[in-house]
Amino acid sequence: MSSEIERRFLIPIAPDWLGECSSVRIEQGYLAIAADTEVRLRRAGDELTLAAKRGHGQTREEIEIALGPGQFAALWRLTAERRLTKTRHTAPLGDGLRAEIDVYAGELEGLLTAEVEFETEARSRRFRPPSWLGEELTGDGRYSNQSLATDGDPRHNPAAGGKERSVACEAKSKTYRLLRVESVAGGLRRVARGRVAKASARLRDADGELADSIHGARKDLKKVRAVLRLIRAELGDKRFRAENRRYREAGRLLSASRDAEVKLETLRALEERFGDEFPAGPSLTWSEQLESDLDRVAGAVLAGAAAEIEQAIEAIDEAGEQIDRWPLETDSWQLIEPGLTRTYRAGRQALKRVRKDGGAENVHELRKRVKDLWYQLRLLQDAWPSVLEATAEQVHELAELLGNHHDLAVLAEDLEGRAGIVAERETFEALIGRRQAELLESALGLGGRIYAEKPKHFRRRLRAYWRI
């Protein structure tokens, strides 16, 4: 374990000589973030590493290990929504010191910071920064890379504690929640614009992480559609259907199948759940067939991706241009109450149908309605964070249970056409059915608690949180 002793600074204007410095492009994402600990993945040029750090301020402990490409790729997908990209320039400062100047890209474009590392704390205290280094950020958690990856640029994000809280700054924030310092109508437009920008940027910067970029962009579009459902009453059914169709069709352009990957992960989870009961030999045959499918689908996606992605980017950008034209005349709670109530009611009705008939179609429909509620509660959680964050987490847990149930249904369909495992088909079917029953039992219990209130009581409770 080594220790870092460093000071960080904000650079107001890029120095003229910056382009003459050696540089490397860095992508990093976070597997875990706690109060004083982080676990980080980084791709710096061809170097792939995993690092665990503990502490804040000038001195931190760090452990770093090298990873192979396969290890890195497997872990990288777990960092979705917690990533950043930057170019690091190294500039000599004299006296054996150097500054690592980070020029951020993507959502953080325009932000420049510098870090100077020291051998001892005494030397750190004696350091006098040159004039081109601006405000010192040492110990300011808002500018840590983990905060930048999760909360965005604090200069433009009031929720992250930034000092600037103007409307212009709010418009730049892509935080997926309504902020106390903005109007509801303006906040919903800001959120929608942010998701559109993020989806478009993911696809433009996909590079070698095409599958992850497509998956992330589709999630961004679903979040925009959740915003639309929240303001459906204000938009009117005709305008809502037109706007919703824009994002649905853009998502379909990115609907290259992830089935092979999901089925493989689901099969492995099933094996882990049932252990010795699981037919090992036939399972290996099935896994090999799914891996072959995965390679074939990946090759087909890569071969035909460019044209479809260009169409998707164009469709997403065109849809985004309409956001400022949304006719949002109402504001505050009156704007969002009808949509939130409708979403809750739809989920409650879907839960009743699942209780009567727990078939795959009904379960999948319930999952979609639960996801809508999750996204919308995330938007509103600042109304009363200690309550709504916990509620949103419960709703997310329910969505995960229902999603796993759906993945097993997809796996069961795949089983019907598989050769080489006919003798064990009934065993596989029985295990899939048992696991689905377990998941559904848990989901119905949790769903019963989430949807215990009548819609009017849910609406009144959320309105009270909002007013408080």
Image: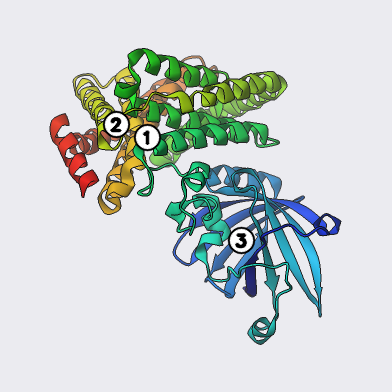
Q: Is mark 3 on a helix, strand or loop?
A: strand
Question: What is the crowding at mark 2: few (fewer than 14 residues within 10 Å), some, or many (at least 20)?
Answer: many
Q: What element carries label 2?
A: helix
Which label is found at residue 335?
2
Residue 349 vertical position relative to residue 145 in the rendered view, above or below: above
One can see residue 281 in this view: no
Question: What is the crowding at mark 1: few (fewer than 14 residues within 10 Å), some, or many (at least 20)?
Answer: many
**Which circle, 3 or 1, is nearer the viewer?**
1
> In the image, 47: left or right of 351?
right
State the image coordinates of residue 173 (x, y, percent, origin top left).
50, 45
Furthest-top residue in this view: 238
Furthest-right residue in this view: 20
Return the residue nearer the eye: 223 or 164. Answer: 164
Are the two marked residues, 3 and 1, in contact with CB atoms closer than 8 angstroms?
Answer: no
State the image coordinates of residue 152 (x, y, percent, origin top left).
53, 50
Return the residue nearer the eye: 177 or 449. Answer: 177
Return the residue nearer the eye: 381 or 268. Answer: 381
> In the image, 461: left or right of 409?
left
Task: Choose the circle earlier in sequence order: 2 or 3.
Answer: 3
For the point 57% across and 63% down, which residue is it? 52
Question: What is the crowding at mark 3: few (fewer than 14 residues within 10 Å), some, or many (at least 20)?
Answer: some
Quote the CA–CA distance across marks 2 and 3.
45 Å
Task: Choose the circle earlier in sequence order: 2 or 1.
Answer: 1
> In the image, 220: left or right of 301?
left
Q: Name the residue under label 3.
A: 51
Q: Is mark 1 on a helix, strand or loop?
A: helix
Are the two marked residues, 2 and 1, in contact with CB atoms closer than 8 angstroms?
Answer: yes
The three-letter amino acid code for the residue at tag 2 is: Leu
Q: Quadrant of the N terminus?
A: bottom right
Quote the CA–CA distance across marks 3 and 1.
41 Å
